[in-house]
Image: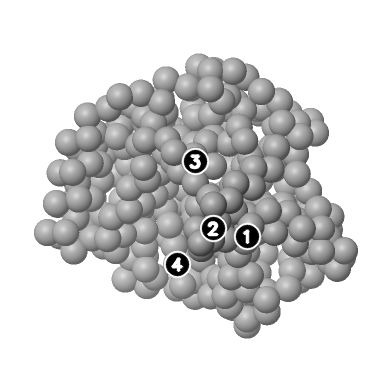
Amino acid sequence: MKFVQVEVSTRCQLSCFMCPHTIFRRDWINADMDLETFKKIPFENFDFAHLQGWGEPLLNPNMGEMIEIAKKYCKVGLTTNGLLIDEFNEIERLDYLAVSIASADEEKHKRIRKCSLEELKEKIKAVSSKVPVTLAFMMLRDTYHELPQIVEIAKEVGAKEVIANNLDYIPSKELESQAIFLQSVDEKPIEVAKIKAEKLGIKLTVKPTKMEEVLVCAENPINNCLITYNGQITPCVYLHLPTKSDKIVRVFGGKVLEIEKVYFGEVWEKKSWKRYSNFRKIFERRKSFMLSLLPTEIPPLPEPCKTCYKAYGV
């Protein structure tokens, strides 16, 4: 396997209106991964470790030591809300740093993220010479047209890349209208952003705005996995949620659904990895469909993946 995502914390200082941490706050488990659990992760089996799940990783008091442990075996990166990056002394030891940004407009950013865009930009400027920075921008119905300005901000703060993501996990019916892939949108701002990015030397990745089932989703369980805050192996964040319930609430196709969480056991048990291997084989068979010379039926998606928008390319 190539990529392990590690949920080092489920806590967060912010209350973004589209985040499950906000929607499910009464049921949320606020916790940090302990150091002993982290040490049991077989980083030697991976090329890259991404230290972030459903929370703000820099809130874990052991982050510095965790980076040191993982870097003995593989490259290390994380995604952060950015509030603590100028206070984190080990930031330059990272190989990759993604900072979430919600809007190119100060007041709108405050409404969405409950924090100042201008202050965040100054924090990014302070570290962008020490570590490669990517801006992670979530395209909402109310903000996707700002993508050209987000590219300009990337240049201003010294970021190398912008990744424009979709609202691909919809935790409540009220948020469904914010997902641009569920409606017809003007693609012109995206095209303008691509031209601007090329001109400014900023790498730009824009997630698709049209749905189409893919053989293997971008989470790629063939090569990737997630280790939860309490040491459970699961394919991705979309099949795990740090709540007290054993179900994940998601909106799909206009319906509010409850999906069983998917775990294969503790990270330190060999049988857990074997169970996960059986899950991965489903996607290996789907991928092999592309190489088949004879007509064959595509193996169906696992049941919990059928109602996940990631399985449809967005």
Identified by mark 4, the residue type is Tyr
- Secondary element type, mark 3: loop
Task: Specify the farthest residue to the front.
Answer: 294
Res. 213 mark: 3
Q: Is residue 98 left or right of residue 257?
A: left
Mark whose residue sits in front, 1 or 4 = 1
User: Which residue: 39% across, 70% down?
Assistant: 131
Q: Considering the image in quadrants, where does the N terminus appear?
A: bottom right
Of the residues tagged 3 and 4, which is closer to the observer? 3
Task: Quote the CA–CA distance across marks 2 and 1.
Answer: 17 Å
In the rendered image, which quarter is residue 210 located in?
top left
Q: Where residue 293 sits in the image (x, y, percent)?
A: 51, 62
Q: Which residue is drawn at the image coordinates 73% and 73% (left, top)?
A: 42
Q: Is residue 177 above or below residue 144?
A: above
Q: In the rendered image, which quarter contains the C terminus?
A: top left
User: Residue at horizontal 63%, vertical 60%?
Assistant: 284
Q: Which residue is mark 1?
A: 284
Cα separation between marks 3 and 4: 30 Å
Mark 4, other Cα within 10 Å: few <14 / some 14–19 / many ≥20: some
Q: Position of residue 251 (x, y in %)?
A: 58, 24
Residue at image mark 4: 96
For residue 151, above or below residue 16: below
Q: Quick check: 145 left or right of 215? A: left
Contact (Cβ within 8 Å) of mark 1 with mark 4: no
